[in-house]
Amino acid sequence: MFCSKKIVTREESDGDPKPIDFDWVFLMGTARFGLTYEQTGRMYFGKWLDFFEIYKNIHNFEVKRQFFQTGNQQEPEKTCGSIMDL
């Protein structure tokens, strides 16, 4: 009944769902994160994604020797005010 059903991630901006490549997930879990095959298989996918976000920062630091900010993390503008405004 469900043999043709594939597990897919959230839809991308173009609307096409992308299937999860489990071979790549297990390869990253074992080769890069240092986990065993069984530990990677038992891990929730959300936790694996958290590990991968951390790994991306570490990889950028090791390869390019600098940290990159991910996402739209902007500091709020600092305005100079007058004491009279208080």
Image (tube, helix red, strand yellow):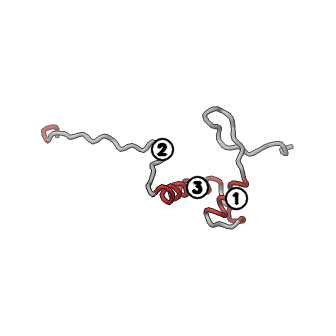
As drawn, which residue projects farthest toward the left?
A: 84
Residue 34 vs 14, above or below: the answer is below
Circle 3 residues within 10 Å: few <14, some 14–19, many ≥20: some
Rendering coords of residue 51 (x, y %): 57, 58
Q: Is residue 86 left or right of residue 60?
A: left
Rendering coords of residue 61 (x, y %): 48, 58
- Residue 81, quarter of picture: top left
Q: Type of residue at label 1? A: Phe
- Residue 65, quarter of picture: bottom left
As drawn, which residue projects farthest toward the top?
A: 14
Query: Disc 1 designates what residue?
Result: 26
Q: Is residue 85 left or right of residue 19?
A: left
Distance CA(mark 3)–CA(mark 1): 12 Å
| Depth order, front residue of 15/3 | 15
**Can you tell which mark lies on residue 52?**
3
Q: Type of residue at label 3? A: Phe
Q: Quarter holding the C terminus? A: top left
Name the element at disc 2. Answer: loop
Name the element at disc 3. Answer: helix
**Can you tell which mark lies on residue 71?**
2
